[in-house]
Image (cartoon, rainbow, N blue to C red):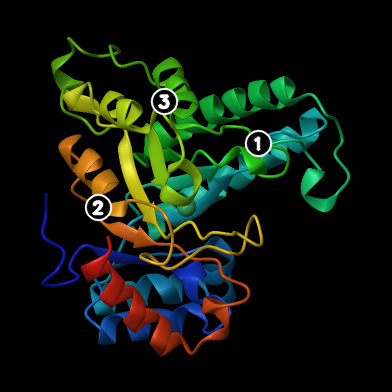
């Protein structure tokens, strides 16, 4: 397992962690100052500054992306709504290309309208079918332009509002169905290519899963197509006071982060550990400098 205690070369900052303190250009500037090599920005933060300006700033600072947040939200009450969602995902892929992201993270969506308190329908299996169809359609374009899609399973407490893909197993089932492991196996031209459909593993959402270790091993069972595309870290606080915006800093909660990193590294994941903390009552209230410095320290001691 890699030693993170001496430096922070594998630290990435998901820029939602600092969304209340700074605009994205300032976040990039502060990350560059601290030798942080990667970020994962959100579309609204990019749009607020300007896509081209952010792309230039990234090239200038040499900061890479560990992912781009986010596409998804496929289900809709009617065909026009689902078409809208596909167009929006296509735009997200184009932005991800401009920013040279290694993958577009998908929060797949759930019951349409539920996020605003008025679900258009309550049939979660319908939502799951629409998610599958939406990913399948988006994957066609993603393959053409070579932009991997990373399905992020969300904790089941968010199954109504944000994502009806709720376990790593469920996400990998989708990957195997839509991007089958055996397709092209005997075709020399596609051997060793990157997989175009994988998963973003976010500790906050998956730490509790009794099948986590087993499914992490499954994600890399085909060495030519490792499904682990991104790894998001934070911690699970006890008690958690808000389902969305009470994520803990690594080391402040109950997740055995080093053990789980051991599993993903064993499965061949050697990319960034991306710190993603939404924290209404704690970290979003602190000075950005303190948050970043704490992320660096905890990346060394707790991740
Ligand atoms: Zn995440």
Tell which circle, 1 or 2, labels the residue nearer the N-terminal end.
1
Report helix, strand or loop for mark 3: helix
Is residue 176 shown above or below 254? above
Dot 1 alpha-carbon crowd within 10 angstroms: few under 14, some 14 to 19, many 20 or more: many
Q: Which residue is mark 2?
A: 258
Picture coordinates of residue 21, whole percent (x, y): 54, 84
Marks 3/2: CA–CA distance = 23 Å
Front position in the image: 294 or 109 = 294
Tell which circle, 3 or 1, labels the residue nearer the N-terminal end.
1
In the rendered structure, find residue 74 and report the number of the disc placed on it: 1
- Do the residues under discs 3 and 1 have CB atoms within 8 angstroms? no
Report helix, strand or loop for mark 1: loop
Dot 3 alpha-carbon crowd within 10 angstroms: few under 14, some 14 to 19, many 20 or more: many
Is residue 92 shown above or below 148? below
Is residue 119 shown above or below 233? above
Q: Is residue 265 left or right of residue 113?
A: left
Is residue 57 shown above or below 147? below
Please name which of the two marks, 1 or 2, marks the residue nearer to the observer. 2
Front position in the image: 288 or 92 = 288
Quadrant of the rendered image containing residue 267: top left
Front position in the image: 182 or 235 = 235
Q: Is residue 56 left or right of residue 94?
A: left
| Whether residue 15 is visible | yes
The quarter of the image holding the C terminus is: bottom left
Q: Which residue is mark 3?
A: 172
Report helix, strand or loop for mark 2: helix
- Residue name at image x 61 percent, y 63 percent: 245
Picture coordinates of residue 248, whole percent (x, y): 48, 65
């Amino acid at each position: 397992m890699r030693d993170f205690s001496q430096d922070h070369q594998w630290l990435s900052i998901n820029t939602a962690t600092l969304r209340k303190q700074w605009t994205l250009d300032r976040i990039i500037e502060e990350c560059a100052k601290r030798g942080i090599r990667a970020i994962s920005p959100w579309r609204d933060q990019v749009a607020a500054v300007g896509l081209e300006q952010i792309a230039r700033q990234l090239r200038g600072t040499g900061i890479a992306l560990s992912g781009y947040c986010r596409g998804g939200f496929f289900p809709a009450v009617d065909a026009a709504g689902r078409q809208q969602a596909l167009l929006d995902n296509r735009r997200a892929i184009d932005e991800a290309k401009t920013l040279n992201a290694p993958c577009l993270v998908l929060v797949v969506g759930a019951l349409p309208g539920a996020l605003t308190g008025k679900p258009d329908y309550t049939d979660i299996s319908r939502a799951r079918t629409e998610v599958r169809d939406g990913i399948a359609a988006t994957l066609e374009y993603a393959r053409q332009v070579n932009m991997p899609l990373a399905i992020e399973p969300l904790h089941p407490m968010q199954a109504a509002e944000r994502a009806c893909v709720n376990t790593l197993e469920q996400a990998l089932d989708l990957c195997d169905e839509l991007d089958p492991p055996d397709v092209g196996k005997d075709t020399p031209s596609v051997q060793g290519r990157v997989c175009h459909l994988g998963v973003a593993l976010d500790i906050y959402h998956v730490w509790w899963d009794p099948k986590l270790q087993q499914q992490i091993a499954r994600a890399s069972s085909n060495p030519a197509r490792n499904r682990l595309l991104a790894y998001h870290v934070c911690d699970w606080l006890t008690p958690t006071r808000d389902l969305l915006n009470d994520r803990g800093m690594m080391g402040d909660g109950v997740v055995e982060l080093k053990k789980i990193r051991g599993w993903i590294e064993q499965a061949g994941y050697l990319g960034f550990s991306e710190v993603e903390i939404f924290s209404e009552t704690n970290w979003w209230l602190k000075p950005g400098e303190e948050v970043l410095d704490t992320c660096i320290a905890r990346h060394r001691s707790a991740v």
